[in-house]
Amino acid sequence: MSSDIPNSGHKPDGGSKQPKASPASRPKFWNDPQKRSLLFQTLLIASLGFFFYSVIDNTLTNLEQRGITTGFDFLTQEAGFGISMTLIDYTEASSYGATFVVGLLNTVLVAVLGIIAATILGFIIGVARLSDNWLISKIAAAYIETFRNLPLLLQIFFWYFAVLQTLPHPRQSLEFLGSFFNNRGLITPAPVPEDGFGLVWGALVVACVASWLMSRWAHKRQDLTGQQFPIFWASVGLIIGLPLLMFLLAGAPMSIDHPELKGFNFRGGLTIIPELIALWLALSIYTAAFIAETVRAGILAVSHGQTEAASALGLSKGKTLRFIVIPQAMRVIIPPLTSQYLNLTKNSSLATAVGYPDLVSVFAGTTLNQTGQAIEVIAMTMTVYLTLSLLTSLFMNWYNARMQLTER
């Protein structure tokens, strides 16, 4: 039986091939988006390469004309200037490399102290901002609106010139528990470790490790049985008690260096210079205002049903905030909190305005002026701040990952 459908001579669609575009139908070079984008990218890379080549060549030419040699050999040369505050042994005969280490340590010191103080104060103000007490809430709001809208440099000047420099002179120092407070700083008795004090440091390390292990055990125990363990007070007792016990067993290997007024200033003891105090106060108070708003936003992001459920279970407001609200709010708080930590670290470079010997002041300032090695000094300074920022971000990202909800 013959088919009524005529044979058209075409293959089915599945076996058909698209006809190749003829040379006349292909788009011209300027109308081909792939070729055009490739050309533009090539021109951009060539322009950037020429720009950097011109900058480097011009820099090397100027350095050669002025007789300035490049390299890091200057770090071994004698610095020849003193520094008002050092965390390591340093004299005027020390090298420029030592000034770099001194400035780095001073920068890290004020940044760490500022982060700790700003975090504590910011959390307190942020929680107080949401208090049911009208007065506390308004005081917290006034704090936030005042300090976050004043320039940080102005706040540094306020604490240094308007507060600390108006204190009495050393002969009329304010005395409290053997410490003296005057316009040259806070002078306190200094502990001097003696032979055998290394055992105390060892006991402190053991106590910290034991507290971490105990914390892990307490969380597993709570997951299995629902019973809580006073991990905070147990850790505090362990961290304080074990080193104290080792200190007593080792025969109290420590002496106290008491400050004494000799002439127009104090000798001995531990001196905290006013530049550090002013910078620390300004950085902490300024950054705490931003952290407080971050904490408030994080708490408000937690569903109100969570607090209602906690109240239905009979939990107090303090326990509800500690065990229900804050753990959930931290997932919202941590990312912007990281930015505030980075800002505080970078803002510490304003220390040069009041003469605090941080990295910018003693290395990118005095060292640069004396050596003329601008490229090397600025590059090392930028690398330090970049490294500190990356390390802070790395730690906070790790902590943020641990705080995220995970399926079990």
Image (cartoon, helix red, strand yellow):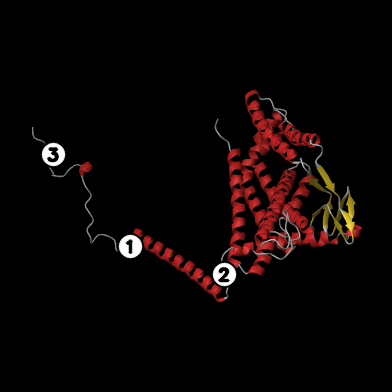
- Which residue is the extreme one toward the bottom? 65
279 or 38: nearer the eye?
279
Q: CB under 8 Å between callouts 3 and 2?
A: no
Label 3 SS: loop
**Cα distance in 3D space between marks 3 and 2:** 92 Å
Amino acid type indicated by mark 3? Ile
Query: Circle 2 sits on which residue?
Result: 69
N-term-proximal mark, 3 vs 2? 3
Picture residue at 62% right of the left edge, 24% below the top: 224
Label 1 SS: helix
Q: Residues within 10 Å of mark 3 (few under 14, many from 20)?
A: few
Residue 181 lies in what quarter of the image?
bottom right
Q: Residues within 10 Å of mark 2 (few under 14, many from 20)?
A: few
Amino acid type indicated by mark 2? Thr
Q: Position of residue 303 (x, y in %)?
A: 64, 37
Label 2 SS: loop
* Residue 217 against residue 17 in the figure, above or below: above
Query: Circle 1 sits on which residue?
Result: 31
Name the mark nearer the viewer: 3 or 2: 2
Check residue 5 in the rendering and tell me which mark sits there, or answer none.
3
